[in-house]
Structure formats: C-alpha cells, structure tokens
C-alpha cells in the first residue's frame, strides 16, 4: 500500500468514527444504552479511542473489525426501541459477518439479538442518590454518575454530604472534582453556586450538605426522597453505625464502599448481587481487592475446583498511610508511603467467602503497600482439584472475559509490555495478565491487575443499580 493509501485509509476511519459519536451520545442520553466494542466502552470516547477499540478486536478473535463493518450496527441500534442496557456492537458485527455475506439482514439480526431489551415502556422511575463523603471513591462515583446524565438516566446524583463547611470549602471541593492527579481532568464543566451551596457539573445540580453525623440530615428539605445513601467515609461499618443514615428523612437504603462487619451482606457485583433482596436496607460493596479477585476465583473454581490458595496483594498506598514518618496506630503504616514498601494485613482473601461461600476457609492473604498512587496487583497462588497448563488456563480465562456472565468484571491482556500506569481508568474489577500466568498440573498462579479506585467504583455503581431494582443487562448474551 502506498503512503497516500495509508493516509486515505486513516481518513476514512477517522470520519467514520466521527459519524458514530453523535449516535453513541444520543443512544446513551435518550435510551440509556451504553455501546461497547469487545468490552471497551465508547461512552464519551474520542475518535481516536473509537478507532483503537476496533483495532483491539484482532487480539480477541484473530481478525480486525473495520469501522465500516460496525457502523451499520450502530445505525440499526439507533432505530430500535432498546433501553437500559449495554450493547457490544463488536461482538454483534463479528458474529454477523461470519454468517451473512452482505448487510441486508442487519436490522432483522439486531432485532433478534436485542429482543430482551426492546421495549416501548419505561416504567422504572429515576432514583435519588446521595454521596456521604467526597474522597477518592466519592469523587470517582460522582464522575461515573454525572457521565450518565440524560433523560433516561435512572441514577440521579442529588447531593453530597461533608463535614466542615468553612469559608472556601465549596470551591475547593469543586476544584477536586475538576482536577485529579491520577485520573486527569473532569470531562466537562464544573460550576459553583455559592448562594445555594451547590455544585453544578454538566448540568447536574448537586446539593452540598454539611453534617457531622449521618442522622443530622433531613434530605426532604432539598426535595430528595427514597434515596440511596452511599457511605464513602469508612467511619461506620456495622449496622448500628450505618443505620444512623436510615434515621434521616428522605433516606431509604445505605451502601458502604468498604468491607462491612457483622451480618451485613458483602456484595461483589457480577458474583453474588443476586443475594440482594428488596428488603435489604444496608449492603456493603466489599473492598477493591475482594472485587478484583473474587470474579477470577469464581471462574477458576467453576472449571477446576480450588483446594486452597494464597493471595498476595501489591497495593498502591492510600490516604490511611502517612506521607512522611509519623505516628500511626497500625503497625508499619506510620512510615512514609511514597518512600517505602510496607507489609500490612488485608482481609480480602477471607472476605471472598462472603461473596463466594464455596471458598470458605480455603484462602489466606497478605498485602504489601507500594509507592504508587493507584493501580494494584493481586498474585493468586492456587492448588487446584483438576490439572491444567498455562495455555489452557489462559484460553479459559480469555473466554470468560469475552463470553461469560463475568465479562464486565474480568478483563484479559496478552501484552508483554503492560505496566501499572496503563491500567489507570480500567472499568473492570480485575485484568488478568496472561503473560505472567504460571500453571502446571494442579498448581496455578494468576496475576491480576486492578485500578483500585476507578475499577472498584464501577463495581459500586453496579451494586447501586441492583439495590434500587434497576435492570441493566449486557447484550448479546454469551
């Protein structure tokens, strides 16, 4: 191919990606349909990101997907009364072109494949959400909720609750939402309404409420009712503490973004969200590490059976540690986080059994905090009941990442160059690094990357939807 043909080919792809963008935006805003290509989200994606998502298809199926092959599927999707779902046009297009010689059957094919989500009714009312606390996870949850802004959005961020309220606090909170040293700038505009004590982000009006205790707030004064309160503080972890939220008028349910104590259900979305019942008023979304490892452990156990194992977490430092050496009530955590690797405890391995009871008593765990601000890795060493090898295990995990009910939790990479910073912004609970897999006989070691902030926040949103009875399926099935 001549140099001019390369440029012409690029121009065609670029223009096709540009033509996709308004259709993708309208599908999400008006119908609540999130479009992906083999799991890679196209919501708010740039033209370059759309092109790259199509190039990555080759890694999964051994052949590339051209934008001119997928564009008709986006067009057909925009004509269907599909609502509140995630649609993988990459899988739809690849499967279609393998079966049909031309585009004449695309609309009929799409109607069949997406029949479960085609409806003219919209009987699910939008639900109010309150973020109690506005730290690392709180601000990322805000970003995820705000990017879903549209008439079809069923999760409405109505307020954030903070301690303090000193002069200048509101602008500083807004500034932290606008700019993030790890995750980059906010995709849109953030304004401050000083008079009404609110932040307006991409048209979403967020009331800022100051309180020192969960039971001090009357949400109904702000027009908020039947709300899900997402507690990001980590201060209250049992029923007595989290139950204080339910004493506030306008609050109906509570979700904790940390492991809970006592009888509170710890839920890993994709694994045991079916355990959430309508009558459950307090639920935990477990920890970032538990969310990263449990889907992978479930996949492995389903096929091979796990006799026992150990999970070692190489975890980025967190706000709980000190920047420089200073007193800390926990062992070693008082030493400077940016300068040291710090051995500490993790309850993630034991917590797995709360979401996956079949592994009760089978796992041990430990953690090493390392001098990186985000993205962690879990090294899962397992003794299996059945035999396998590296190639077979990797192929199985790859298939689970692409075709199973865990496809939104497990990602898979075969890159020999990937490093932790490449995983910043990953929306998956965990990403299996196939190049590092070790397996022989009944022994296996898996290396799982995870964005312990953003990936975990995506899992939390899934639990929020389930708690509020909002159905959001992934299509096509399988």
Image: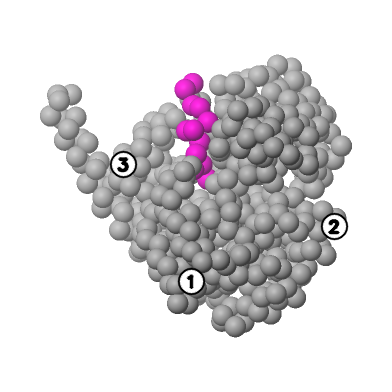
Residue at 44% in and 30% down: 59
Is residue 154 among the parts visible in the rendering? no
Q: Quadrant of residue 308?
A: top right
Q: CA distance from mark 2 to mark 3?
A: 47 Å
Residue at 68% in and 19% down: 439
SS at circle 2: loop
Q: Which residue is mark 3?
A: 48
Q: Which residue is mark 1?
A: 198
SS at circle 3: helix
Q: CA distance from mark 1 to mark 2?
A: 36 Å
Q: Earlier in the sequence, mark 1 or mark 2?
A: 1
Q: Principal SS element in the magenta part?
A: loop
* Residue segment shown in magenta: 416-427
- Say few, some or many: other residues with alpha carbon within 10 Å of mark 2 (under 14 / 14 to 19 / 20 or more): few
- Residue 97 lies left or right of residue 321; in this view the side is left
Give the number of the disc on residue 263. Answer: 2
């Amino acid at each position: 191919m001549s140099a001019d043909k390369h440029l012409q080919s690029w121009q065609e792809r670029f223009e096709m990606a540009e033509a996709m963008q308004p259709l993708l935006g309208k599908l999400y805003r008006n119908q609540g349909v999130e479009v992906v290509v083999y799991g890679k989200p196209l919501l708010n994606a740039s033209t370059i990101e759309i092109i790259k998502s199509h190039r990555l298809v080759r890694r999964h199926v051994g052949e590339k997907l051209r934008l001119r092959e997928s564009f008709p599927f986006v067009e057909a999707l925009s004509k269907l009364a599909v609502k509140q779902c995630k649609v993988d046009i990459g899988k739809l297009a690849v499967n279609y072109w393998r079966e049909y010689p031309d585009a004449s059957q695309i609309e009929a094919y799409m109607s069949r494949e997406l029949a479960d989500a085609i409806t003219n009714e919209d009987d699910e009312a939008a639900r109010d959400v309150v973020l109690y606390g506005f730290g690392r996870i709180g601000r990322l949850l805000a970003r995820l909720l705000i990017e879903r802004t549209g008439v079809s959005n069923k999760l409405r961020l109505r307020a954030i609750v903070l301690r303090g309220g000193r002069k200048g606090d509101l602008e500083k909170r807004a500034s932290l939402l606008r700019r993030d040293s790890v995750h980059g700038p906010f995709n849109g505009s953030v304004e401050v309404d000083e008079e009404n004590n609110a932040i307006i982000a991409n048209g979403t009006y967020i009331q800022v409420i100051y309180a020192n205790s969960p039971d001090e707030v009357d949400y109904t004064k702000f027009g908020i009712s039947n709300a899900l309160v997402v507690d990001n503080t980590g201060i209250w972890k049992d029923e007595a503490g989290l139950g204080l939220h339910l004493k506030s008028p306008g609050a109906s349910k509570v979700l904790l973004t940390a492991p809970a104590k006592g009888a509170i259900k710890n839920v890993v979305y994709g694994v045991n969200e079916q355990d959430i019942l309508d009558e459950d008023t307090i639920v935990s979304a477990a920890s970032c590490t538990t969310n990263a490892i449990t889907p992978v452990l479930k996949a492995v156990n389903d096929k091979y059976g796990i006799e026992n194992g150990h999970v070692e977490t190489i975890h980025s430092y967190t706000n709980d540690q000190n920047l420089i050496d200073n007193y800390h009530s926990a062992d070693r955590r008082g030493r400077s986080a940016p300068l040291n690797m710090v051995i500490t405890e993790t309850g993630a391995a034991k917590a797995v059994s709360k979401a996956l009871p079949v592994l009760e008593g089978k796992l041990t765990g430990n953690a090493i905090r390392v001098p990186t601000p985000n993205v962690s890795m879990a090294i899962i060493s397992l003794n299996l009941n059945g035999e396998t090898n590296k190639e077979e295990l990797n192929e199985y995990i790859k298939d689970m990442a692409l075709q199973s009910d865990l496809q939104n939790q497990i990602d898979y990479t075969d890159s020999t160059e990937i490093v932790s910073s490449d995983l910043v912004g990953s929306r998956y609970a965990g990403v299996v690094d196939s190049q590092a897999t070790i397996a022989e006989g009944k022994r296996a070691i898996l290396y799982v990357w995870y964005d312990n902030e953003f990936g975990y926040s995506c899992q939390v949103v899934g639990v929020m939807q389930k708690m509020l009875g909002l159905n959001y399926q992934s299509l096509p099935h399988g």
